[in-house]
Image (cartoon, rainbow, N blue to C red):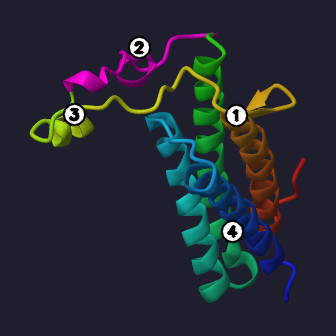
Amino acid sequence: MTAGRTPLILLLLGSGGLLLGALGFQYLGGLAPCPLCHVQRWPHIAVVALALIGLAALRGRRTAFALLPIAAALAITAGYGVYHAGVEYAWWTGPGACSAAAGGFDPSKVTTGNLKDMIGAAPPARCDAVPWSLAGISMAGWNALISAALAGFALLAGLRALGTPAR
């Protein structure tokens, strides 16, 4: 394994691990993702794809063609993570589709005829609620912190691959 490939492997493991963690919380932990959670996953999917392409097709200086877009994707998801954490902690308002107060559920209104309509009209998970946190930091906050660190690593590795001294 050459030094240029090691960052791609680490970034693949980093973003892949964050995605698997999110899916684990969703499908094993029962935490429904809100729309902002979904938006934060797309850049990680791009990172996984770019890292795999880079590992399969690029060598030497050309790994920068994967590492620099990876850094950009990670910076984007870190930014969304900061925005989402700010919505969760009420630093600013979030999108109206998932930040308004959730309406109450009335089981007496459920019939076999309207169940499908009610499921389709159900509001998404709330963006302004913290469903899980560790050390007082929400999942969105952890995504922001980890993604920012990975973005910095990807940027430095990309610059190193280009032969440009990182200052």
Of the numbered discs in the image, which one, if any, rests on residue 64? Answer: 4
**Residue at image mark 2:** 100
| CA–CA distance in space, label 3 to label 1 | 27 Å
Q: Nearer the viewer, mark 4 or mark 2?
A: 2
Q: Mark 4 and mark 3: span between their CA atoms?
A: 49 Å
Q: Are marks 2 and 3 in contact (CB under 8 Å)?
A: no
Image side of residue 139 versus residue 98, left or right: right
Q: Is residue 94 visible?
A: yes
Identify the amino acid type marked 1. Answer: Trp
Q: Is residue 47 above or below residue 101?
A: below
| Disc 1 target residue | 132
* Residue 134, x across and y down, in percent: 82, 34
Q: Main secondary structure of the magenta part?
A: loop
- Label 2 CA crowd tier, 10 Å (few <14, some 14–19, many 20+): some
Report if residue 97 lies within the magenta region.
yes
Query: Is 69 located above or below residue 127 in the figure?
Result: below
What residue is drawn where x is 30% and y is 26%? 107
Viewer-proximal residue, 123 or 55? 123
Please tell me which of labels 4 and 3 falls first in the chain: 4
**Picture disc at residue 118:** 3
Could you tell me residue 78's position as x and y percent?
A: 66, 39
Residue depicted at x 75% and y 61%: 14
Alpha-carbon neighbours of circle 3 within 10 Å: few (<14), some, or many (≥20)? few
Residue 18 vertical placement versus 32 (above, below) = below
- Magenta-highlighted residues: 91-109
Q: Position of residue 121 (x, y in %)?
A: 23, 32
Taking the spot 48% from the left edge, 36% from the top edge, the residue there is: 34
Tell me which amino acid carries mark 3. Met
Identify the residue at the far front of this view: 108
N-term-proximal mark, 4 vs 1? 4
**Residue 127 as seen in the image, left or right of residue 106:** right
